Image (cartoon, rainbow, N blue to C red):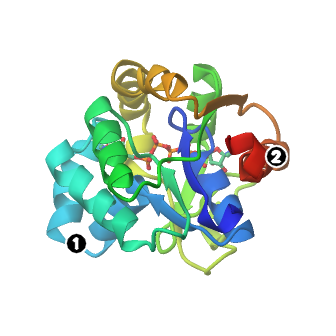
Amino acid sequence: MTNGLRLVLFGPPGAGKGTQTRLVSDDLDVQPISTGDLFRSNLEKQTPLGIKASEYMTQGILVPDEVTIDIVLDRVMSIHSDDGFILDGFPRNTAQANALDEALGRRSRPLDLVISIDVPEEEVVSRLSGRVVCRSCQTPYTLAGNGQESERRCDRCGGELYQRDDDNPDAVRKRLEVYQSETLPLLDYYRERGVLVEISGVDTVENVNNQIMALIQRVSKPQDKE
Ligand code: AP5
């Protein structure tokens, strides 16, 4: 059932959601849906959605639900009900979680698993100050600090690497506050529904990925789903 997996990767800014979403969706044939990437690629193309979203993103606050929910749910519902997806960065508040549940409920295909990747604040700040992302495919990288970054290109698509506007210290502080006040309460929401697993994100990318893949294997066994 891994191809039909319906997974949410949850966690604070810099937890590694985007990194792990790429690894898992490459491994299993499931569609990655990242709200941040969606907004940034729209901004690259200067679409009205991208321009509108960037007003909020640069401040480190959530893009309003009336802009976000329909776009994400359109994506989710455009995927065949037997096929899987990974949501990275959605839902981020109760209204988004309710809207997602309702949409999936209409197909009788609820979420299989919500994995929360926990990373402490000081690690988040350190990771985000050293992050660059690809302008074209949004893959994140960590600056090597060897002075050769300006020549480096994306390993996946050869695109230009840049630092995100919202990775400055003020915006990161605000994003962490918003995570605490608006997004973190969703842990209880998913815990009550029996789909939440919490893991530590303070380990190598490979070890975090191994933990995630093991959890996915567990929910794929029919006896574990009863
Ligand atoms: P979004 O782009 O989703 O940002 P975020 O949630 O703040 O998460 P990040 O992308 O910063 O981090 P990540 O967890 O993906 O970590 P990454 O893998 O890059 O959202 C941006 C904005 O869009 C929001 O602030 C909001 O304005 C808006 N938005 C998005 N969704 C929304 C929604 N649903 N509703 C309303 N508004 C929304 O890794 C970070 C760094 O660490 C990288 O350099 C990476 O190489 C490195 N790294 C990864 N794993 C490890 C590891 N295990 N060890 C060491 N380094 C690691």
Label 2 packing within 10 angstroms: few (<14), some (14-19), many (20+): few
Nearer the observer, 87 or 195? 195
Q: Give x and y (percent) for residue 166.
A: 38, 43
Identify the residue at horizontal 65%, vertical 72% (top origin). 29
Residue 145 in the image: above or below residue 83: above
Residue 146 in the image: above or below residue 93: below
Residue 130 visible in rendering: yes
Number of numbered discs: 2
Q: Tell which tag, 2 or 1, sits nearer the viewer.
A: 2
- Asked if the residues shown at circle 2 and circle 1 are in contact, with their CB atoms under 8 angstroms apart, the answer is no
Residue 28 left/right relative to 41: right
Q: Is mark 2 within 8 Å of ligand 1?
A: no
Q: Amino acid at mark 1?
A: Gln
- When asked about the image quadrant of residue 122, the answer is top right
Tell me the CA gap for discs 2 and 1.
40 Å
Q: Give x and y (percent) for residue 46.
A: 22, 72
Nearer the observer, 1 or 223? 223
Residue 142 visible in rendering: no
Identify the residue at horizontal 56%, vertical 64% (top origin). 84
Residue at disc 1, secondary structure: loop
Residue 222 in the image: above or below residue 42: above
The residue under label 2 is 214
